Amino acid sequence: MQFSAKVSDISKQRSACAILAVDAKNRLSASGSALDQACGGVIGKLLKRGDLGGKLASTLVLNLVEGPAERALLVRAGEGAPSQADFRKLASASASAARGFKDACSYLTELEVTGADSTWQAQQLALAAGLAAYKFTRCLSDAKGYPLAKFTVHAPERKQLKAIQRGVGIGAAQATGSNVARELGNLPGNICTPSYLASEARSLAKQHAQLTTAVLDEKKMQSLGMGAFLSVAKGSDEPPALIALHYQGNNSKGGKASEKPVVLVGKGITFDTGGISIKPGLQMDEMKFDMCGAASVFGVMNALLELQPAINVVGLVAAAENMPSGRASKPGDIVTSMSGKTIEILNTDAEGRLVLCDTLTYAARYEPEVVIDIATLTGACVIALGNHASGLYANKDELAKALLDAGERTGDRAWHMPLWEEYQSSLDSNFADIQNIGGREAGSVTAACFLSRFAEDYTWAHLDIAGSAWNSGANKGATGRPVPLLVEYLLGR
């Protein structure tokens, strides 16, 4: 999609759809009033009929016979200045209503949002438009997406134009990254394999000079002693891969190429049957989404390549398939991780932490400033937080706060969970240094405690996205989260 920002006179601006705010008393914004006048007062007359619902973010599309805009998309903004959360609702609802038209111009920047500037508003509008226009078509015989190909954000005053352009650029990149993650997540497991992800990484690196990639195959992982990682892939005919993507923005922006990177570690279980501890059949198809942490790493890299910030970021994708077979790991098996710690595998369906622990050990060789792992790790996190927030764990409160703040700014929210020493004892094993599951209680917490034992040498955070990475039911599909949160955090650095 093409995104832009401009100062436009709505009485002359041609568009397929002009998005306009209407307050609780049916009053239009300045541009809305100007368009109403240009088309002979028809908008005001139709508003008096009460066709636009009174609920916040209700929408109504009017086909206009006169005036430069083919349609006016009215969205109910309520009384007074909307909150940031309410403005996101307006952005999302209007974007969804406009995605059926070839282009749209949003004038919602004429609203004053509590505690937010025009850059933030433009960012939310562009992000919402980009997300709304995504549709998975790759495996459809009739591959028709939404028509929306151009989205413009109106700058009420020329002095605001640069700030709004900046916001549009950030929001558009966050949408691009989110949609890359959604596309990878939505692909079925027979297409999106570890080898496919490796191929995608190589292809991306070929297109961008700022990005380099390397892929560690099974033989190399064996030489590094990644026994935990390899134990997950044993039951599958698909070979595992540890994929490294290195974005070096400082090389092109005058910064220091040697600056310590932020390392993002993504869980990439391209299909998870549970292994020998096999899952129930109901909704097992959704286990193609078990690589959404890896997908988010690809999404962030794509966003960074659009924005070109002067930072160094390494993405590590721990890709494997978890299958049952005569070669698969069994409950009670003991493996040796790259760190040298031995692990008793009590449940082969707790496999994400096994690929992640070796990848977290491997991450130390980059001498990172910060390491953040992203994983659809535990059903317990879904029970605790539902699908509204990602679970956030960190060994430094400053990092946790920075990530929480980034989530609040983007609406891609997280919740800070405890990582207390008292939980660690549930991982004690009679036969190895550590077991891979705790008891029934606090399953998301004990999973994070397991990972924390492999991230003691650096500043680290863990995002459990099991609830936020995809939707079930009629709207089944990957969400692209937490790409907006991560991009916002990285730009904030």
Image (cartoon, rainbow, N blue to C red):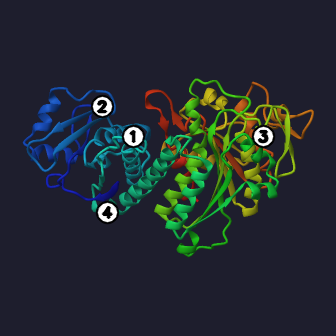
Q: Are marks 4 and 2 in contact (CB under 8 Å)?
A: no
Disc nearest the viewer among 4 and 1: 1
The residue wearing badge 4 is 159
In terms of secondary structure, where does tag 2 sit?
loop
Of the image marks 3 and 1, the number of the one nearer the N terminus? 1
Quadrant where the N terminus sits is: bottom left
Query: Element at badge 4?
Result: helix
Numbered badge on residue 140: 1
Q: Amino acid at mark 1?
A: Leu
The amino acid type, in three-letter code, at marker 4 is Lys
Give the labeled residue for mark 2.
58
Q: Nearer the viewer, residue 401 or 127?
A: 127
- Mark 3: give few (<14), some (14-19) or many (20+) Cα within 10 Å: many
Q: Label 3, secondary structure: give it.
A: helix
Spatial distance from mark 4 to mark 2, Cα to Cα?
Answer: 31 Å
Label 4 and label 1: CA atoms lie apart by 46 Å
Q: Give the quadrant of residue 152.
A: bottom left
In this view, the mark in front (3 or 1): 1
Cα distance in 3D space between marks 2 and 1: 31 Å
Give the alpha-carbon distance from disc 3 to disc 1, as whole Å. 41 Å
- The percent position of residue 18, horizontal first and vertical second, equals 22, 46
Q: Three-letter amino acid code at disc 2?
A: Ser
Q: Earlier in the sequence, mark 4 or mark 2?
A: 2
The residue type indicated by label 3 comes to Phe
The structure residue drawn at horizontal position 23% and vertical position 40%, both measured from the top left corner, is 73
